[in-house]
Image: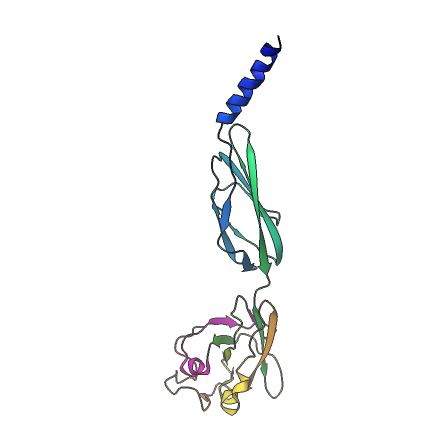
Amino acid sequence: MKKLIFLPVLLLMAASCTREVPRARFTVSAQVIEAGEAVAFTNLSINADFVEWDFGDGYISNEYDPVHVFTRPGTFRVVLKVFSSDHFSDESMMDITVLYPTTLEITVKEYYNQYVVPDASVILYPSLTDWINQTNAVAEGFTGIDGRVVFTHLAPAVYYVDVWEQYHNNYILAGEDVAFIRTMALVPNAVNTFTAWVDYTGGSRKSGTIRNPASNPSGRKMNATK
């Protein structure tokens, strides 16, 4: 009788040994990123018939190889759960560190009366030579009604700031002192600020003493559109 009792158990154990148990494993494109950057997840699991990703920020996906964007800073534990059709499961996890993006907030102000200048084109250059020749621009933005423009996901470097508006620019000030257009080296993963002083030109064609004479006769770079 005892042999009959244990026989079904032995058969069940033998059957379970032949089943393909899933194993969860994955890699990521980067473990340390800035907020707003996309992370690609590569699923290396075996014997998985169904997958579930929990990104730790409130989002879940059943895609096999998802791409996810973390929108806020923090450390997020990503958990991959895999399941087989036989109801076996496994999981793997990894922490993703999301940093605040390196940001530069520029306020454009008229030098003498110190009023803000809206609707001004602001272009960042990586060097003074590039600023003079209007080459290798890093980014361009336009000031809002408060005279501010914000650039994100920048390298922690020094930038040279070109400002132009129909009645204002910083070209003459740059000729007096390059510090008027040069930022400090940006602090990484922080909000950096810079005041870009400009002169009121009244729509004249004055372009300053260090601006490349090959520029547009209006005093504005040829490759910028507004």
Residue 152 on the magenta span: yes
- The answer to which image quadrant residue 3 occupies is top right
Nearer to me, 169 or 132? 132
Residue that appears at 59% across and 57% down: 97
x and y percent of residue 153 in the render? Answer: 53, 66
x and y percent of residue 210 in the render? Answer: 44, 89
Height in image: 57 above or below 6? below
Nearer to me, 82 or 193? 82
Residue that appears at 53% across and 25% down: 16
**Where does the C terminus fall, quadrant-wise?**
bottom left
Height in image: 63 above or below 70? above
Which residue reaches farthest top? Answer: 1
On the question of residue 200 being in view, the answer is no
- The answer to which image quadrant residue 191 occupies is bottom right
x and y percent of residue 90 in the render? Answer: 56, 37
> Magenta span covers which residues?
127-153
x and y percent of residue 101 in the render? Answer: 57, 64
**Where does the N terminus fall, quadrant-wise?**
top right
Q: How many labels does the image show?
A: 0
Coloring scheme of the render?
rainbow
Height in image: 107 above or below 66? below
Q: In this view, does 211 lie to the left or right of 177?
A: left
Residue 147 on the magenta span: yes
Residue that appears at 40% across and 86% down: 212
On the question of residue 118 being in view, the answer is yes
